[in-house]
Image (cartoon, rainbow, N blue to C red):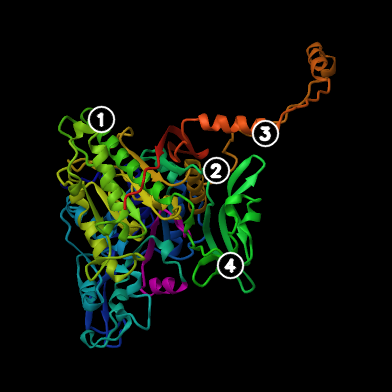
Amino acid sequence: MKIKFDSNQPYQRDAMDAVLGLFDGQPLSSGAFEFELSDAGSLAGLTELGLGNRLALDEAALLRNLQTVQQANKLPASAALDGMNFSLEMETGTGKTYVYLRSLFELHQRYGFSKFIIVVPSVAIREGVITSLRLMKEHFQALFGNVAFDSWVYDSKQYSKLRQFAQSSTLQILVMNIQAFVSQASNVIHQEKDQLSGRRPIEFVQAAQPIVVLDEPQNMESEQAKKAIASLNPLCTLRYSATHRSKYNLVYKLDPVQAYDLKLVKRIEVSSVLDDPDFNQPYIQVQSISATKTKVTAKLMIDVNEKAGPQRKSISISAGGVDLFEKTNERGNYAGHIVDEINAAENFVSFTNGLVLNVGQTHGGRGDDVMRVQIRETVREHFDKELRIKKLLPDIAGADARLKVLSLFFIDRVANYAAEDGKIRLWFIEAYKELATLPKYRELSPLSVEKVHNGYFAAFKGIPKDTRGDTAADDDAYALIMQDKERLLSPDEPLRFIFSHSALREGWDNPNVFQICTLNETKSEIKKRQEIGRGLRLPVLESGERCFDASINRLTVIANEHYDEFAAKLQTEIEDECGVKFEGRIINKKNTRTAKLKQGWRLNEDFKELWSRIKHKTRYAVDYQTDVLVARAAKNLAARDKIAPSRISVQKSGIVMSGDGVGARLLGVREAEAKPLLH
């Protein structure tokens, strides 16, 4: 199948017009110029010829254009140009890559600019750009009259191709990792080469004065990275991100709330899988260990006796000898749990009874039970989504329309799935087989479990392994993810459940991901915007067209935290990263109010009557025999049928995002019994 791209999205047109407006008044004939490089590398002599970008506008004209664009987009006006950096903020999933790629063609058509470089901070983003260029090639050629263009990735082993970049008269789009030119000392691009008559490869880039696009510039903010980008001698730098750290000359803004309101991304639901504590065994989780010059501190999550009953809470300890029996206000099941050592070098806390816990590890919890239920809930949500689409899609897109549903699992330990006896693999197979046979899902004709799941991991000598996401071994994994993007969208492709390492999260933005489940040994510390970002894009029908129906476009995150906590974190991130402020807009309906007494209340007849009945002091005495009370209590307990098994609750809620803030609306509650674990 081929994805079809809509060239008439108003918000994308606004973003492109913001960039084009910066150069208003630039004559088309002046968009390029011939340059000459001498043997010494200067712009004199006739030994090397090329075609580069040239700016005919002066600084005053550019500033006027900038302020005009900002005014049109209701953004604060820049008082001074402050360099040739221009920022565009676009929420994840709204087509940022499409916008900046098409903007390059628009700039070429309107002003004649022909040399462009896209700089990316990671392999994952680079592979995404390459895939987008491949998928959009026919679309752009149809829009721009079959314009000839070259797009390629810089390879230090083929540095001589930069001469082609400089000399070509056609539109040139070069994709570069920042790591390829950030080091003056070690990168090939900065070294003199005999093959280039003693010149440094970067000189050809500099002479062409390219327009530079930064994809996710917040990841290229170091002083070294800034110097490296400046060394490209850019005519200007266009910065595109959903989460800018520094907004240089902001010319366009589409924040998360706007994207949500305009239905440009999926709605968000959270299915919270929670371990309801029974407090019958000691619970200890090492949350963090930090060290200063004078002390080492560990944060532990434990159960503490409070007046209202036992509560799970976080405490800080900074020395050995701490007795958790005392810290829990003498909970008997913590007897003997005395801290022996807090080791910041190896990130563990040990106890005198032999227990050793690393950061993130839990003693006494039911982490495996929670993960198992998360997997089951993801499969259930997947089948429910397929059922919903099967019922709704004919009325929305026609009787023959089909839409593939994908579910994405992120795991932090590859062996838990990659191994044939990996616990996550076994739990998935168990859940799929059980749910697929339910009468409710019979009309879906579920495929055999062997065909519907697979993993994408970095590998060393053919063996899947844990990774950081930025190693050489990750390159093949990212390439495979991107190459499979279209194949995975086809309903005829049986693969529906995808497992990937948490570190490879960045490359996954397949539009037909409807369920995301993060399976970590501890509570996920991944940012919420990053977690949901992989599934926010609007889905694609088999025909290649987008589905815009809000009743279908819902992303479900299966999380191991309460939905209110999820919503609060999401709101904090939006405030911190996007500058969208919710203060003063959020109203807590549970807030108490001060009631003022009316004048003359003491003379009110109703009050006098009430007071006459409640003013008397009353004392009660209870007389009982201890042995009789104990005997009756024991008899009552023995008569009970059984002790209820421990349970894990599943609470589903819809995330509500508006100018008032990010909140959650409870949609349903279900309990899952903790079954014996498979091994």
The disc at residue 627 is 3
Question: Where does label 4 land, which residue?
Answer: 340
For residue 637, above or below residue 420: above
First of labels 4, 1 by sequence position: 4
Q: Secondary structure at mark 3?
A: helix
C-alpha span from label 3 to label 2: 60 Å
First of labels 3, 1 by sequence position: 1
Q: Amino acid at mark 2?
A: Phe
Residue 587, picture quadrant: top right
Q: Count neighbours of disc 3 (C-alpha within 10 A) and say few if under 14, some if 14 to 19, many if 20 or more.
A: few
Which of label 2 and label 4 is nearer to you? Answer: 4
Q: Amino acid at mark 1?
A: Lys
Q: Nearer the viewer, residue 287 or 20?
A: 287
Q: Count neighbours of disc 1 (C-alpha within 10 A) and say few if under 14, some if 14 to 19, many if 20 or more.
A: few
Q: Secondary structure at mark 4?
A: strand
First of labels 2, 4 by sequence position: 4
Question: Where does label 1 land, which residue?
Answer: 440
Question: Where does label 2 land, which residue?
Answer: 582
First of labels 3, 4 by sequence position: 4
| Contact between labelled residues 1 and 4, with CB atoms less than 8 Å apart | no
C-alpha span from label 4 to label 1: 54 Å
C-alpha span from label 3 to label 1: 55 Å
C-alpha span from label 2 to label 4: 45 Å
Over which residues does the magenta segment extend?
A: 223-250
Residue at coordinates 46% horizontally, 61% vertically from top-left? Answer: 60
Which of label 3 and label 1 is nearer to you? Answer: 3
Residue 115, picture quadrant: bottom left
